[in-house]
Structure formats: C-alpha cells, structure tokens
Image: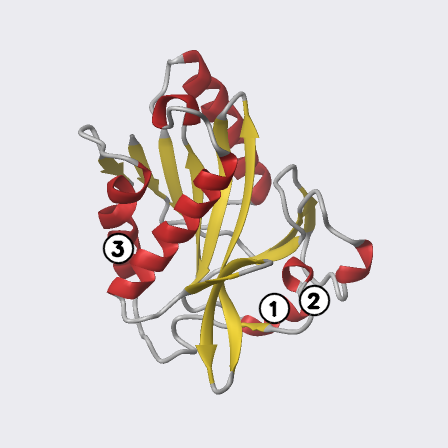
Amino acid sequence: MEIVISDDLVNYPEALQVMEGRVAAIRAGTAPETIWLLEHPPLYTAGTSAKPSDLLHPRFPVFETGRGGEYTYHGPGQRVGYVMLDLKKRQKIPDIKLYVWQLEEWIIRALRDLGIQGERREGRVGIWVAHDGTESKIAALGVRIRHWVTYHGISINVDSDLAHFQGIVPCGIREFGVTSCHERGVRISMNDLDEALMKHCGMVFGSDQGLKATA
C-alpha cells in the first residue's frame, strides 16, 4: 500500500480524475492500493442521496459525485482521506458494511491518540463528539466501490472554518452541528493527524509489509 500526502490544495475535478485512474490501475494490478491525504479549496459535494433542499446557500462550487451520502463541505483545515483498496484481496468475503466500520474505526483510533473521543451513533453517518450536553460531527464518510475497489473515503475537521458548513445541511442532519479538533481545544497540526492515521492504517485495514508514504 502507498500513502500519498499532498501539501498543496487539490482541486476537486483533479482529485476525481486521479482517483478514477488509480482505481482502474489497482483493479488491473498495475498500481498499489493507495491512501491519499489532502486538502481541497472550499467546495460542496453532493452524494447520491443528496436532497436539493439541503443546499441552502451555495457560496462555493458544488460538485455532484458518485459517492454515497448527501451534501458535505471540504476546505482548508480539513484532512480528506481518499482510500483506494481492493476488498477482494483484503477480505475473505468482500463486505461493504465491514469496510465502512473500518473507516470509522480508523478515525476513532487516530483521534483517540490525539486526545479526542470520537464515537459512532446508530442511524447517523460519521464520527461524533459529545460536549456541553449535545454532540457534533467531527468527521464524515462517503464511499464508492467499483469492482470491489474502494474510493472516496473520509474527512476530518482539524481547523476548518465551521461557518462554511452553513451553506448546506451536512449529511442531511439538521438536529446536530459540526465541530473540529481546534474547536474542541485540541490544537493539533495536520501532520499530527497524518501520523496518527498512518499508525493505525495497517492495524485497521490489515497488515501491510510494503506500506510507504510519499509526498
């Protein structure tokens, strides 16, 4: 498996093109499985279940995408992880629910190392943080699978401008808000999060003797 870290902001159409090419190459056996860690410029994406009424104030570009889920926001200060794995090689019987659980577990373990208790909630997608008698989403998930090769993935709010989420109903959930590591008082860097994610990658998705990181 290869972990690629992009230091510069990556435009969304470029990211889609790269993912499409890598997924095809993984399936063909000509490229390694890849986790791509990056940030996007401010934008909204619409998953396959997105409702037009949940796009409230489209102040940033809006992209329709084939991932599952509804509307979400990406922007600077948010770590996006695009996960391209071959489930046929990693699971005895390919299981999408297990894969989603692994993505959640990956986020939870990484955040725990950094002093944040992220939790699952029944019936609500994403990872949640309880505080002040309520709870807010700190990480989102949205996946697509083609011929059992995964792509799209996760986003974790490190130091996101949370006001940018006001242009949508994030993931179609109106009752709860969003938060970030910095808002919760945990002043980590993007590198801190990357190191925690890389640490737990093999533990969650399966051992990788050939794990390497590139910038």
Cα–Cα span, label 1 and label 3: 26 Å
Q: From the top left corner, tell me how far across and down residue 127 is, in percent.
A: 47, 61
Q: Is residue 207 left or right of residue 141?
A: left
Q: Quadrant of residue 54?
A: bottom right
- Which labelled disc corresponds to residue 164? 1
Q: Secondary structure at mark 3?
A: helix
Q: Earlier in the sequence, mark 1 or mark 3?
A: 1
Residue lying at 55% horizontally and 30% vertically, measured from the top left: 145
Residue 212 is left or right of residue 95, and the answer is left
Badge 1: residue crowd in 10 Å (few <14, some 14–19, many ≥20): some
Q: Nearer the viewer, residue 213 or 141?
A: 141
Q: Is residue 22 visible?
A: yes
Residues at badges 1 and 3 in contact (C-beta under 8 Å)?
no
Viewer-nearest of discs 1 and 3:
3
Tell me the residue at 77%/65% (across/down): 56
- Could you give the CA–CA distance between mark 2 and mark 1, rounded to whole angstroms? 6 Å
- Quadrant where the C terminus is found in the figure: top left
Check disc 3 and report the residue beneath it: 196
Image location of residue 35, percent across then percent down = 37, 38
